[in-house]
Image: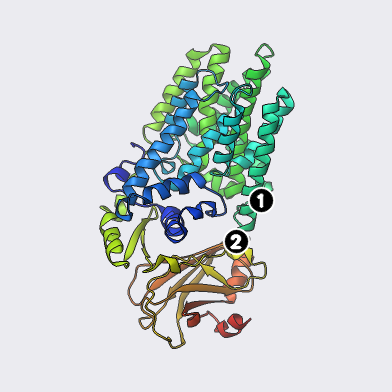
Amino acid sequence: MLRQPDQWRHPVVWIEDGTQVLPDLLARGIASLADPVNGYLVVCSKLISWIALQFGLPNYAIASTVLTLIASTLCFTAIAFAPTRLRHARWCALAAALAPVGPETFVSPIYLLWHTGILLLLVLVWDPSRHTVWRGAVLVFAGLSSPLVAFLLPLLALRWLILRHRSDLACTAICLLVAACQIYLAHRMGDTGGATPDNLEYLPVLLATVCGQFLSFALPPTWAAICGGMLLAWLALPLLDQRIPRDDRTNYLSLVGILVLSVAAMLLRVGHTEALQFHGPNRYYFFALIALAWLVVQHASLKSRWFVAIPLLLAVLANSLHQYRLHNPAQDILPLKWSAPAQIVKATGQGSLPVFMLDRVVNLDVPLDVSLFKRGRSCAAHAAGARCVIHPWIIAHTDYPPAIPRRDGAIVSTSVQGQDLWARLDLGHNIGDRYREFHVVGKLAPLDMEVLPFAGDGGPLFELHATFGSADDAARFASSYCVAVVTDGKPALLASPNRECDALLTH
């Protein structure tokens, strides 16, 4: 609760929870649990949101916050009581809860994918002689709720090769199936990250830096790398001690594997340039910091070196005391109310719902008849770059006139920043709020695309954001693309930087 104190005073709905999960639940109900978010299955997050929605739309923000807190607490409590081979499991649970992870991973349903990943870590250090069925069930549920399952696969396979236990073999097979599902969806949706394997050459430097920031985020990058290297050297000692039992050494090696693979995943996801610029808590450090906290406890238990571990854990606790987040009062967006506009939507079937986007608030239009939602399709799924419906939550009203005259709209501005394209769209006053779908057409397919409402003067304004595999692709797309707003199945407004909309739409 202390990580996000403003969430309890002013409950809000966060990012994808408002822009994707909630609209999907309103449109398709519990059947939308199988729909990916940003290319990944997040069953637990969607299940929490669906349960919260049963308390009514006006109560959704506070209900989802409370239910997320309960779910997170259960994940951390599982560390203490699951049948694992972790030594001092209760201390491991406390160390994980107090680790200096980014506050953004708390109290938001969509970010439960990080906390359900803890259950996958427990599967890795599970006692293979106990409760194999429960182990498999936890693996399936958590694996369908967090993409971490893909990185768990090689560690489970290595564990089976060392211990040769049938439970580990069965879990490796289950993990293979679940991971294949997550990887397939991520590849199909084009959400595999913009970095390349070349970034892995920076792994030792980033690994040392993350370990240093585990002790204190106040350390400069150079000193963080030095202190982190010393911590890594200390943590490596149990791997060299042959007197430690094989099972304990295997568990310890598994935690080291989680630490290394989580940092490697961060490099593959965001690239070395951005990763090395991180200075402070963020969600990409989550599993690395949890693994570090457990390694400190396990090392102290195996080698009876609590005189070193206790000062380390106290330093980590002091580091965590500063890891909280407010709702960005500098942007003057507090108090942000959810229940009042939700009451209007519930009573009239019209209106807008505020969604908190960290640095701004966007108002999402709500449909009069949720049955009219159309499922959006990922742009990356169209290999030829054909037309693509973007974010079906942009549906305002159903009382369309028989026909809306075809007219030109305006793409006010288009800019390319690296692999990202940003465009400002002005629908004009005549179109009003009768738009139904956005269709974006170009000569190649972006990896990801979204259209967000933009506050400003004039007619309805929107911001188009598209991400491509390279800066050259973004520039090619910017030179020739168009946007159509569709009502009653017909293009009502066309806009293009070079007036090629007619030819592109016909194609």
Q: Residue at x 36, y 38 (%)?
A: 3
Vertical position of residue 478 compared to residue 315: above or below: below
Q: Check the image and name the residue furthest to the bottom.
A: 405
For residue 303, say whether it is visible. yes
Q: Amino acid at mark 1?
A: Thr
Vertical position of residue 173 compared to residue 77: above or below: below
Which residue lies at the image location 55% right of the left edge and 21% below the top edge? Answer: 86
Mark 1 or 2, nearer chain start: 1
Residue at (58% x, 25% y) in the render: 131
Residue 58 location (% of width, % of height): 30, 54
Q: Which residue matches tag 2?
A: 447
- In the image, 342: left or right of 228? left
Q: Where does the image place residue 419, in percent across and percent down from the top left?
A: 58, 61
Disc tally is: 2
Q: Amino acid at mark 2?
A: Leu
**Of the numbered discs in the image, which one, if any, rests on residue 225?**
none
The foreground one among 358 and 393 is 393
Numbered disc in front, either 1 or 2: 2
Name the residue at 46% across, 80% down.
488
Position of the N terminus, as image quadrant, is top left
x then y, percent, for residue 290: 51, 31
* Element at label 1: loop
Which is nearer the eye, 231 or 164?
164
Circle 1/circle 2 CB separation < 8 Å: no
Colouring mode (rainbow / by chain / secondary structure / one colour): rainbow
Q: Tag on residue 196?
A: 1
Is residue 159 visible to us here? no
Based on the displayed image, in which of its 4 quarters is residue 507 positioned? bottom right
- The local crowd at label 1, few if under 14, some if 14 to 19, many if 20 or more residues have their Cα within 10 Å, is some
